[in-house]
Amino acid sequence: MNSTDIIRGNVRAMAGYVPGEQPQDGAFIKLNTNENPYPPSPRVVAAVQAALAGDRLRKYPDPTGRAFRQTAARLLDVDPDGILIGNGSDDVLTIVTRSLVPEGGLVVSPTPSYLLYRSLAEIQGARYQQVPYTADWRLPQPWPVRGANLTFIANPNSPSGTCVNAEDVARLAEALDGGLVIDEAYVDFAERHCLSLSRRAKVVVTRSLSKSYALAGVRFGYAVADPALVREFLKVKDSYNCDTLSLEAARAALEDQEYLSATRARILRTRSRLGASLTRLGIEVTPREGNFVWWRRTYRAVKQTYEEVKRRQILVRYMNYEGYGDGLRITVGSDAEIDRLLEELGKILAV
Amino acid sequence: MNSTDIIRGNVRAMAGYVPGEQPQDGAFIKLNTNENPYPPSPRVVAAVQAALAGDRLRKYPDPTGRAFRQTAARLLDVDPDGILIGNGSDDVLTIVTRSLVPEGGLVVSPTPSYLLYRSLAEIQGARYQQVPYTADWRLPQPWPVRGANLTFIANPNSPSGTCVNAEDVARLAEALDGGLVIDEAYVDFAERHCLSLSRRAKVVVTRSLSKSYALAGVRFGYAVADPALVREFLKVKDSYNCDTLSLEAARAALEDQEYLSATRARILRTRSRLGASLTRLGIEVTPREGNFVWWRRTYRAVKQTYEEVKRRQILVRYMNYEGYGDGLRITVGSDAEIDRLLEELGKILAV
C-alpha cells in the first residue's frame, strides 16, 4: 500500500500553491514577495518586547483578540464584533472558504489574480472558475457566472496592481447569490477602498498587516463583515489562531498611523519613479495601486529577464497565467534596491 | 435575506469548539487549560529577542521551517522531510483532517477525549463517531468501527490523563484502513510514546510545544509522518502558517532539553502530591500521565465544586461528555497554586 492512498483525491490531484522564493541567507535583493522595504514601527518592537518581559508566553492567547479588535474597530469605525482575526489574511481567506464552500461547490475570481483562490477551491474539493478582467482591467459587465458559493476580488489586484471602483464592486455584490470576499491586502497603497461594503450581508473585506505595516514575518490579517457572519467564522477558525506576540504587534502597528503614512509616502514616491523608469526603458507597465509594478510581456521574453536578474542576485516574481500569459511582478523596494535593479536592467536590455 | 444564508449547513448547525476560559486580567489562578506553571527556557526569550533585533519582521518566514525541522529531526531521530510544522498542534490536526476527510466522510475517536476532533469533523461536513474507552481506560479490542477516513487517539488522553500502550495503538493502526493520528500533545509528561509508529504508512504523530515547553502563547506544534504524506499535507497547509518568532522560539525550546527535564520533574512531583492529596480527600482520580488530574464524579456534583472553586478565584475545567458523564480536569500548577487549591477544596468539601 502507498501511504498517500489515504489522502483525498482532490488533494492528491492538486499542485498546491507555490509561494515566492524565500531564500534564508540574505544574499538576494528581494523584490519578489511584496515585502515592505522599511522595518515596522518601533512601537511594534516595543510592544513585543513588553509581552516577552511578562508572564505571557506560557499562557494561551486571547482567542478572539479583543484588544486588537477594539483598536481596529475604532480606527475603521466598525463594530468590534464584526472583526475576525487571522494568522495572516490567508488564514482569513481559508476560514471564509471553509465556512461557505461545500465539496463540489463553486469558487470564482477574476484572472489574472491571486493564485491562492484556486488552491483554496481545490483543497475544498470545489470547482474553480476564472473570469478574465476586461482589457482595461475592469470587471466584466454583466458578471458572467451564476451560482458561485464564493467569489474573490483582490482589490488592488495582484499581479496587475490595478484597482476597480467601489461602485463596480458594489454592483458585483448585488449580482451574486453567494459570498463575496474583497481582498484588500494592498489597499493601504491605493487611493480607494471598499470597507463600507462590509456592512452588506454577503460581503467580507479582508486586510493584511504583511505589506503596509511591514509585518510579513509576524503573520497577521483580519476580516470585516456582518457580526452574524463573523459568529459563524469563529466556529471554523482555530481557537488560538493568533499568538500573543502577533496580537500585540498588530495592535501597536495600527496605533502608529503616523509611521504608516510616512513609510507609505516613501514607497509611493519610489513606485512612481520605478514606473517612469521602466516606461523609459520601453517596458509596458499597468496602472499601479499596490506596492509593486506589473511588467507585461512586450518585446522580450520576461522569463529570460527574470533569470538574468536572478543571476545578478535580484529576485523578482515571474508569473504565468493560463489564458493570459506571463509577466514580472516587481516589488517597490527601497530607493537603493530599485536603483540597483534599474542599473542591472539597463545592462540586460542593452544587449 | 439573512447574512448567514451563505454559510454551509454543517457549519450553521454546529456549536463550535469552546476553549477553556482565558480571562485576560490575571486575577485567577488558572488550572483550566493545562498551561505550564513555569516560564519557557531563557534561551527561548533570547532567540526571540535576537530575531526582533534583526531585519526579519518585515520579511516572510521560511514556509517549511527548515531550521526547526533539522533541530527536531536530530532530536527525534527522524527524517526532516517527515516533519510538518504547525501553528499549534491544532493547526496540524486541521491540516490532516482537511487532507484525509471528504464531506460525508467519517471521523472516529475514543471518548471521553479531546472535543476538537468532533468539531473538525463537523467543519468538514463529515460524520463523527465516538468509541467508549473500556472501564480501565484501554482501547476496545477488537476495534468496533470500520471505514473511518481518520481516527484520532489522544495519548496521553485528555481529560482522563491515561495512556495506552504502544502495542495497543499499533494493533489499532493495523486494523484501520484510513489514517490514524496519535495526538501526543501531553507525551512529555508520560513514560512512553508512539513515535516509532510514525514510520508506518498511515500514521501521523502530532506534538505540541504549548504544554511541556511552556509556549502556549506562541502557537507551535508539529507532526511526524511518512515524507510522502507530509508532501500532501504541505499542499493543504497555509504557506506561511508559522511566523518567524514562533519558529525561533520553537527551535530554541527544543535545543534546551535540560530545561525541559528540570521543569518536567517539578511538575511530576507536584502531580504526584496533588493526586495523593485528592485521594486523601476521598476524591476518585484516574492514573495520570499528563500535566493534569481528572477528578471523576463520585459522591458530590462536580459542577457545583467547579463553581465554588471559581468563586474563590481558581479556574479548573468542568467537562461533561455525552454517554460518559462529567468531571473536573485540574492542571498541575505550581506548588503554591496547588496548595491554595487544596486549601480551598478542604474548606468546600468540609461543608
Image (cartoon, coloured by chain):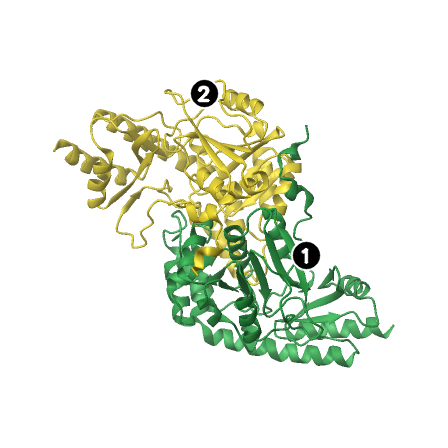
Chain colours: A green, B yellow
Work out whether residue B185 can be spotted.
Answer: yes
Rendered view: B31 above or below A324: above
Corner quadrant of residue B260? top left
Q: What residue is rendered at 82% in x and 63% in y? A: A304
Q: Residue furthest right?
A: A351
Element assignment for label 1: loop
Residue A3 in picture, x, y percent from top left = 65, 32
Q: Nearer the viewer, mark 2 or mark 1?
A: 2
SS category of the residue bearing label 2: loop
Type of amino acid under label 1: Glu
Quarter of the image for residue A23 reads bottom right
The residue that disc 1 covers is: A21
Looking at the image, is B167 positioned above or below residue A182? above
Q: For the N terminus of chain B, which image quadrant?
A: bottom left
Q: How far apart, in angstroms, are the residues tagged by discs 2 and 1? A: 49 Å
Q: Which chain is mark 1 on?
A: A
For disc 2, the chain is B
State the residue in front, B64 or B4. B4
Kindly identify which residue carries mark 2.
B140
| Rendering coords of residue B222 (x, y %) | 54, 41
What residue is drawn where x is 61% and y is 46%? A125
Dot 2 amino acid type: Pro
Above or below — where is B249 with respect to A40?
A: above
Q: Position of residue B305 (x, y in %)?
A: 21, 37
Do the dots labelled 2 and 1 sit on one chain? no
